[in-house]
Amino acid sequence: MSSDGVHALRNPLKDNPNWLVVRDRALVPAGARARAWRDWVVANDPVYAAARRPALPEKIAASVTLALVAAILLFLLLFDWNMLRGPIGRWASAEYDREIRLNGDLDVNLFSWTPSAHVRDLRIGGPDWAREQDTLTVEDLRASVRLGPLLAGRLEMPLVAVTRPRAVLISTADGRQSWRLDPDAPDTGEGLKLPPINRLLIQGGLITLDEQGRNIKLEAVINAREGSDEQAGFHLDGEGTVNGTPLTVMVRGGPFINIRRNRPYIFHGEIAGVGTRLIADGSITRPFDLGHFNATLKLRGRDLADIYLLTGVTTPNTPPYQLAGKLTRDGSKYTFADFSGRVGSSDLSGDLVVDRVDERLRVDADLRSRLLDIDDLMAVLGADPRVTPGGDTVASSGAPGRLLPDAPLNVERLRVMDGTLRYRAARVKRNDLDVREVDIGADLKSGILNLDPVAFAFNRGELRGTAKINATRDMPYSAIDFRLRNYPLESIIPARDGVATVTGRALGRARLEGPGASVHDFAAGSKGTISLVVPQGRMRAAFAELMGVHVLAGLFKLDDESTAEIRCAVADFTVSGGTATAKTFVVDTTPVLATGSGTIDLGAETINLRIDGETKEARLIRLWAPILVRGPLTSPKVDLDRGAVAAQVGVGGILAALVNPLAALAAFVDPGLAEDANCGALISSAR
């Protein structure tokens, strides 16, 4: 081996000048070192010397100390703990700003591996605004703790036994809660966390709840007992009302015996009220930490909006529903994951998260439908849903003869929470509008709801836009901006004898804003613009001639399937006070140029339009009579202006009488002087 290799194997301790000392100490046995340390203490430590050969001062100090300890132990053993009831009550009353009293005997046993306390007639009063009723009264309370874990900083309770507790819980509409001992502390929503209790016994408990914000009144009886019969375990049974309708609550759990921190506690709960039923089967993962549990949740009812009265979570109006999924609580966060079911005649699945952020409720939802019934979605907008015997949903506006839903928006519910929503329907059941897909996004913050996108994909074309609802006012104020692209005219105007009357693609835009608690009220008070444009298309020649009221050509061609070109069609309305007034109304075809005027009343949902047609070619016989479109939007009537027809006939009669019978034809001759419209300018001004 080379000298370099030998150098590399050298012990690095040898480079230390004290390495021999280190080596020698390492070779000394541990027992020998301990004996050496003991000998040094005996020879040099003054405390050890005083303890081994105490002088008079040390003997006096030790005696006094032992006497004090014995006196304290004897005092605690013989002390009448009832003497502390008054001081404890006064301190607690001052600390929590409410009257707290221990009216009965107070017994404490400290000399045990499980120290215990026994309190009789405990009374905790209400806060200043609810002093007429005590928040809690307990006839008898016994509790014990384990000494070993307590000294290690953990609280474990072998026994808690409560006899006839009475709790009165009051929550006001402005958010005050009588049971909160520190009203200034932020409400994190993380739930009650109790220490592990091995045995919990409750006899004759009663809870009275008065939740004024959602108008809930409930009285529930609570018992928890040991045993193996059907009455053993935890039982909570409550009855009351929610918004004036019956409410029932039931919770069941196993006996509270041999409960362990790492052993889940199984429970079953049911709530029924306002046409809604919630059923949960789950477990508290770490008893008694009520802020963490897992459960399978099933819910069904007539309208998802009713869930708000039971949970405080705002949801839209819907047809009857039935959903099931996994509910998890993690502190203030609730997750309803991977749920599925039906709403009306549509399937619905997704995930929902409810949390409390900055003391405000927040809801985030991602929802999906494989197959949507469009009437179910209309119910969300305020339409009145009705389920047929076959299981389909039929939605109406809520008022006979109306198109626009008139159900009011509950603005108070939008103000109490924030959140986001994304909803997508992959397919839509066959419908009159030929909607094929739906995509809706929503963001709610501080009472302002932004809808973006609101998108409906048709077989051909789409409607896409945004909407904003300001619910911070007593009367909501909304704004919408929707664009229609490439929607086929044949889906709007019905075919005749199986042949399309009109073909082409429509473009449109609606920009409206205004107050209103419902879709109908918003339209009735709105202002803005509505436009519809057909850049090009084709029309049955007979209908083109009839627009110019060319009677002979139109009537003779009704069975003719030949078509005329639509060079352009533009309808541009200005809206004020819910009335849309035609600013531009032009339908330009190769044979006829038609112009119109009139109004559409969005509040009354009626139309009143007049269409005048001018031919582009000479016509021998033509009635100069405008077409009138009048009546409700759901069923408008098309007719001729009979007064104009009578006037034209009268003119013909006068000419026949004054000149000669052939002169009467002059009243019906149209020289055809109409020219093509400037379609480019019209379309640009309307879009």
Image: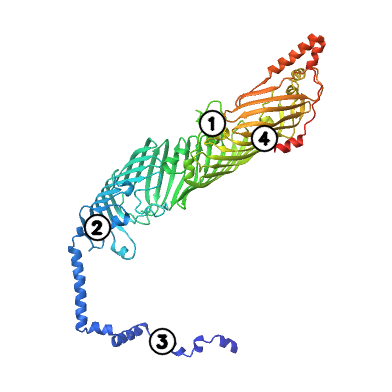
Which color scheme is applied? Answer: rainbow
Q: Position of residue 475 (x, y in %)?
A: 51, 38
Foreground label between 4 and 3? 4
How far apart are the alpha carbons under marks 2 and 4?
80 Å
- State the mark number for residue 158: none
Residue 205 visible in the shown view = yes
**Residue that carries the numbered disc 1 in the rendered image:** 395
Would residue 180 appear left or right of 322 to someone viewing this image?
left
Q: Secondary structure at mark 4?
A: strand
- State the mark number for residue 531: 4
Foreground label between 2 and 4? 4
Residue 226 visible in the shown view = no
Foreground label between 4 and 1? 4
Q: Position of residue 573 (x, y in %)?
A: 66, 33
Where is the C terminus found, in terms of image quarters? top right
**Residue that carries the numbered disc 3 in the rendered image:** 25
- State the mark number for residue 117: 2
Would residue 247 appear left or right of 320 to someone viewing this image?
left
The amino acid type of the residue labelled 4 equals Ser
Please report whichever mark, 3 or 2, sits nearer to the chain's N-terminal start: 3
The amino acid type of the residue labelled 1 equals Ala
Q: Secondary structure at mark 2?
A: strand
Q: Secondary structure at mark 1?
A: strand
Q: Is residue 470 above or below residue 43?
A: above
Q: How many marks?
A: 4
How far apart are the alpha carbons under marks 4 and 3?
99 Å
Q: Mark 3–mark 2 contact, CB under 8 Å?
A: no
Residue 452, picture quadrant? top right
Q: Residue at x 27, y 83 (%)?
A: 48
Q: Position of residue 35 (x, y in %)?
A: 32, 85
